Amino acid sequence: MILSKDNLKVSIITVNLNNCQGLYRTINSILKQSFVSSEFIVIDGKSSDGSISAIRKFENQITSWVSEPDKGIYSAMNKGIARAKGEYIVFLNSGDIFASDTVLADIFEDREYAESVLYGEIACAIGKKYYYSKVPEHITLATYFYSTIPHQSAFIKRELFDRFGLYNDDYRIAADLDFWIRTIILSGVTYRKLDCLVSIREADGISDEGFDRNIVPEENLSIYRKHFPAPVVEDYLNWFGSGFGPNRLFINWLLKRRILTRFLRLLYRIDHSFGRKREAKKPPLS
């Protein structure tokens, strides 16, 4: 049960647009959390697929919700931030789930952190298997050439958005990158990597829908040019020209067309048919 209390530790924000089935999974995962010093906020983009019925079904357990048109995912996330009252904010969008019913308790129960950003591991669910995306232990600018901190596994202090501003919703995909550069890279905001699996995202979740992956390098380059002098931008372009960038774009192209997702699911079915089912191990919290 998610209860609204004074001095809340965590605000959980869920953004949804026409993903009723994924929204049910996410709501159920959040409401099963044993940690009660939290609130639950749902921002819906005026869905027409039954999502509103799902929200109303759990309305008494949702702290705050709204359903209205927005400019996109970051616009919706900003609406959630404006409503949030917790010390830390985590974005668990429709289709995403917490890795266990005790994740929040394991991280926050009887614990205090000095760091402004906490983040752990994330996994992608293909069938009944988890495919892990490793997150960096140490963050430099080069980290963001090829990786990022997924918002599903990051707990961001609410006051950072007061100090550094909200997500720039002029970006369709890269507003996370812009925020991390403004906070961690340019301002030295403190962070800590947690030794635990925080969340699991579905391969066909909200982050795989409705985005043109071809604009990623365009938005990234715009952000680097906005924040850094020409020599730093040149480093990024040299990395991109080395082949690593195009290879990543090719993977994004496969993801956009769900070719890679279908291939991984096929491998899962073959593996399952031969009885080699494996359980994903969840690393313990340090």
Image: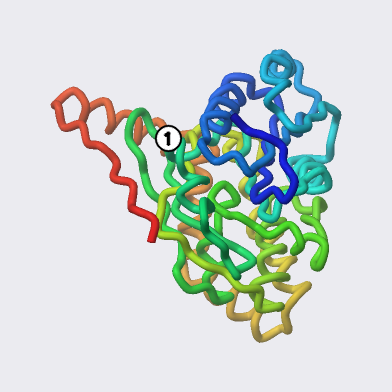
Where is residue 98? Give x, y as percent: 50, 39
Q: Nearer the viewer, residue 51 or 283?
A: 283
Is the C terminus in the top left, top right, bottom left or bottom right quadrant?
Answer: bottom left
Where is residue 25? Give x, y as percent: 54, 25
Q: Nearer the viewer, residue 30 or 144?
A: 30
The residue tagged with tag 1: helix, strand or loop? helix
Quadrant of res 71: top right
Type of amino acid under label 1:
Thr
Q: Is residue 168 left or right of residue 144?
A: right
Which residue: 68% across, 25% down?
A: 61
Where is residue 86? Give x, y as percent: 71, 50
Q: Is residue 52 above or below residue 279?
A: above
Which residue: 72% across, 36% down?
A: 41
Q: Is residue 191 above or below residue 285?
A: below
The colour scheme applied to this rendered structure is rainbow
Which residue: 63% across, 44% down?
A: 37
Which class describes the residues within 10 Å of circle 1: few (<14), some (14-19), or many (20+)? Answer: some
Is the N terminus in the top left, top right, bottom left or bottom right quadrant?
Answer: top right
Q: Is residue 265 left or right of residue 187?
A: left
Q: Is residue 43 left or right of residue 270?
A: right
Where is residue 219? Give x, y as percent: 71, 59
Which residue: 54% across, 36% down?
A: 96
Quadrant of res 66: top right
Quadrant of res 222: bottom right
How many labels were placed on the picture?
1
* Location of mark 1 (residue): 261
